[in-house]
Image (cartoon, rainbow, N blue to C red):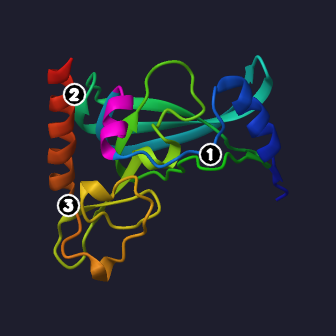
Amino acid sequence: MRVKTLAAAALLLASGRLASPTSVVAPGLDDLVARAETVVVAEVVDIRSSWIQSRPGRAIVTDVTFAIERTLKGRSYAQRSLEFLGGTVGDISLHVAGMPEFQVGDRDLLFIRDSGRPVSPVVGFVYGRFRIVRDARTGMEMIRTHDGRPVGSVADIGNGQPAALAALPHPLSLDEFVRAVAARVAALESAR
């Protein structure tokens, strides 16, 4: 199968749809909470890529459908679909650097921008996605960054320093992370 990478086209399309370049500085937790209109714990249940026609031209987008397990901020949904620029249709792929890539069955805590038609509805591209994994040894659900690195504390979010699992006294659990996010959402709402 022949696959064409349309990265240059993605950058051109993105420049027509974004006010900033696609390189993203890792935001801290407070910034993620402030910029997100919705924060959810969700599982990927479907992924579909298709062509769309937009002002700058044709592009491939991928609709990722999530079953929402818990809403920490914003409007609650049982199921929700988010559209991301990029994907594969037939033998043609459009890859956007820094775009989160999902698989059916993935569980994540997501910080979502609801307004407009962004290239990525996840705040900070990959940085607004936190993977939920079950620790084989303890059975606890733990939080990992988009690339699978453990998170030791919420202060680590956005600092760009890779965590060494052996160096962490206690990797952050899903419950601990949810409590930290909920506290920041409450603080942000009470400040308004």
| 93 up-or-down from 50: above or below | below
Task: Say whether residue 169 is magenta.
Answer: no
- Disc 2 target residue: 188
Q: Is residue 27 left or right of residue 139?
A: right
Q: Residue at x 19, y 72 (%)?
A: 170
Check the picture and name the quadrant holding the C terminus: top left
Q: Is residue 124 left or right of residue 53?
A: left
Q: Earlier in the sequence, mark 2 or mark 3?
A: 3
Report, in whole angstroms, how far the alpha carbon at label 1 lies from the one at label 2. Answer: 27 Å
Badge 1 amino acid: Ser
Q: Residue at x 47, y 42 (%)?
A: 46
Instruction: Say what amino acid the circle numbered 2 marks.
Output: Leu
**Of pointers 1 and 3, the one earlier in the residue sequence:** 1
Q: Within 10 Å of the Cα at label 1, are there few (<14), some (14-19), or many (20+) other Cα atoms?
A: few
Could you tell me which quadrant the N terminus lies in? bottom right
Quadrant in the picture for residue 86: top right
Neighbour class for label 2 at 10 Å: few (<14), some, many (≥20)?
Answer: few
Q: Is residue 32 magenta?
A: yes
Is 44 situated left or right of 64 in this image?
Answer: left
User: 182 or 156, which is in the foreground?
Assistant: 156
- Label 2: state its secondary structure: helix
Q: Which residues are magenta?
A: 29-37
Is 12 located above or below residue 56 in the figure? Answer: below
Look at mark 3 in the image and give the residue it sits on.
173
Pointer 1 residue = 23
